Image: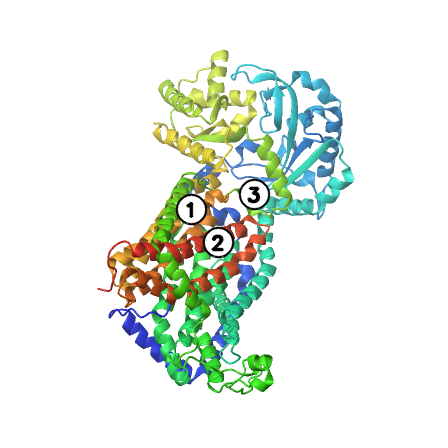
Amino acid sequence: MGGCGGCRTDCVERPLSRALRRLGGLVGAHPWPFLLLPVALSAALGAGFAQLPLREANDIEGQFTPRGGPAKTERRLVQERFPTRDAQHFSAPRLTTEGAFVAFVVLAHEPNLTLLTRAAFAELLALDAAVRGFRADGLAYAQVCARINGTCSSPNPLLSAVGNDSARIEALLPNLTFPVWQMRDFLGTFLGGVTVDPGPVEDQSRPLRGAKALRLFYYLQEDDPARREASLKWLGAFLQRIPDELASLNLTSVRVAYFTSISRQEEFEKNGKEVVPLFSITYFLTIFFSVISCTRLDCVRTKVWAAAFGVLSSGLAVLSSFGLLLFCGVPFVITVANAPFLILGVGVDDMFIMVSCWQKTKVKDTVKDRMADTYAEAAVSVTITTLTDVLAFYVGIATSFPSIQSFCIYTGTAFIFCYIYNLTFFGAVLALNGRREESNRHWLTFMKVSTETQESRGSAYNMCCVGGSYDKSTGAEFEHPMNGFFRNYFGPFLMHSWTKVFVVVLYLGYLGSSIYGCTQVKEGIDLRNLANDNSYVVQYYNWEDEYFKQYGPRIMVIVTRSILYWNSTVRADLENCMASIENSTYVNKYLSESWLRMYVSIADKMSLNIGDRRSFIGNLPTLFQVNPAAQWDVNFTDLEISASRFFIQTVNVTTAIDERNLLEQLRGLTAECNIPLIVYHPAFIYFDQYLVIALNTIQNVGIATGAMLLISLLLIPNPLCSLWVTFAIASVIVGVTGFMTFWNVNLDSISMINLVICIGFSVDFSAHISYAFVSSERPSMNEKAVDALYHLGYPVVQGAISTIVGVVVLSMAATYIFRTFFKIMFLVILFGAAHGLIFIPVFLTFFGFCGRL
């Protein structure tokens, strides 16, 4: 945002103004090259969109988890030490990734009924048979399923127990205990909404009375490229056919929600297609608003064509910048799809400034001189807008989230093209429009019209066919009525003493609410939000949260190096480490799994010698005979055990805060241990975002704020006013962050983008108010504030509304990413405009003289 005020600084403003004055004169004298060259350049660079399919990078893990997260390093270590064999000895808790799978959450048809009935299991068996019957390109489920001892892994222990006879569930029920049914069966992740007989917490054998929900997991092979490719084909066929298959089963006793390992990714990639029609609506709305705001009743002086081509200039900037970056190989992430909406809204802002400055030039001057004056007056305003926005976005490139980096690179580069095209392409349009005005031609027919009204023709004729009037006293066009509104009504009203008191009280209420909201902000992106609101995965996530949150991930505790397991002292140290981990508030110590504890117990019972290296390693086969799965938890040779792992069961990990606290607790406990331990679960890849998102945000905001302060000091020649600009930046950021909480927006990689945007917009709104305040020649503080609002009020309103219009259609999107972008942009613009038009003008009058140095 900006105005045409004239604060002169020798080091920045005057050289810039002189340079742009020469450019403006050149554009005014020779507009056609400046019009056609940007169009040709855009056409050439736009060819880069042919590279779009190759540049799309919508891998959720790659884009929405921090680059270099600790869990990614831990995963590589686990994969090296404990390779999986899905086709031979599959074990879900031992997976190093999420796996390839189909999952169902099944609920009783009536909410208060149990699933553990003959009728429900009859339909479960029918569902199981349908899944096993799916084929894709000749591949049957039996060919791609993960296997244990030569047979496909069971989707649920109870389904295996009943076999093909659904009536057996009723016979089994008296013998079922929860969460542990038998030593090898953990029902905590398979049954939800359970009712059990009362008993002590440590009793893991309480009789099970009923369950409202049940989960089925059909795992597929993925431990080599060929098997993974086959599994992906089968999953693709499954997703296409499962809706019809469920309808054909005609289930009456159960309700079913389904999900696959590729569902989240596929649904996420669909989001980009939803945005295409929204962009066309945005383009129309922006053109409509720009035309309306630049329309005059004078058929010659109206700026309809300038407004329309001003919007086109932003469109060309998007085409050029995106095409260039696609040519350069920059990844195109779904978050970048938000950028055109923002660029379109913000890009027309400079157009409003240039139109405003053009209208203040002398009508009788030549087009060349008017363009030179326009560019000279708009120089600082247009440049500061671009500089602050580009800096804000390029600072965001320093983040560790690739999705944010891509967004910031594309958007920052687009703003550079907006600046260039506004000074060339739009300037040429303004010059050609000036030539039309100079010859007093109608804006639509381009026919010359009379400048004098003709009473005999009627008012309609005079309105449509007479034009070219201007203010004879100033030699410029008549000022827009909104400028008069800010000078004659809004400004004086704001300077009343009682209005100032109200503004102060309003600000204190805003600040208090914002600070409270900041203390309640939630961190991290909920993965369900990457899917469309109407997606089938949302129902699955909702039921999973409702019925299966009691028991969280089953986590590996890994001894990463060789230690002397046969030394009783070392075993005691390891046991102490495990005990401290099991005493975590998020761990149920009665559900741990330790091959070493079992081995020691077996050795005691069988009087085996495990007190030296040879006997300890030599007797391991005895352990594996009793518990075959343990052999996949010990990486050993005849000489040493290079690594081993144990398992702990987490509980009550229900919120993002719990996930962060769990990760911090467990990593802290392992770091304190004198045994080389790490903890790992595939979900930790996503949990890592909680540890860096706040730090990244603070870092980016801090760097960008410092850069904005430097710009303010250069362009506003008064340190006190520069500090007010910095204050406004901090105030808007606090407000947006706080009110995010009230609008159910988390601090995640999506909202973090917008907090960086806050900085640029805070400067756009507030720096220029201070700039105009300093430059005003009025004698009193109140008059300076009114004068600043007179010059800047309408451009600020135009810029704010154009930006809101640019993103408002995103509020209709059925996707969290786009709705969040709208919400935060709305808050940024609302609070930024409130600071620029209300708070800063009032506060500047309170704290002494703020004139030019």
Which residue appears farthest toward the left when viewing the image?
853
In the image, residue 591 sits, relative to residue 776, either above or below, namely above
In-front residue for pair 362/750: 362
Where is residue 584, by image quadrant? top left
Horizontally, residue 629 falls left or right of residue 127, namely left
Asked if one can make out residue 692 in the rendered structure from this viewpoint, the answer is no
Q: Earlier in the sequence, mark 1 or mark 2?
A: 1
- Residue positioned 48% across, 15% down in the render: 601
**What amino acid is at disc 3?**
Arg
Report the disc number at residue 826.
2
Q: CA distance from mark 1 to mark 2?
A: 12 Å
Q: CA distance from mark 3 to mark 2?
A: 23 Å
**What amino acid is at disc 1?**
Thr
- Residue positioned 44% across, 42% down in the render: 689
Whole-percent x, y for residue 839 in the image: 36, 54
Question: Total marks drawn?
Answer: 3
In-front residue for pair 366/626: 366
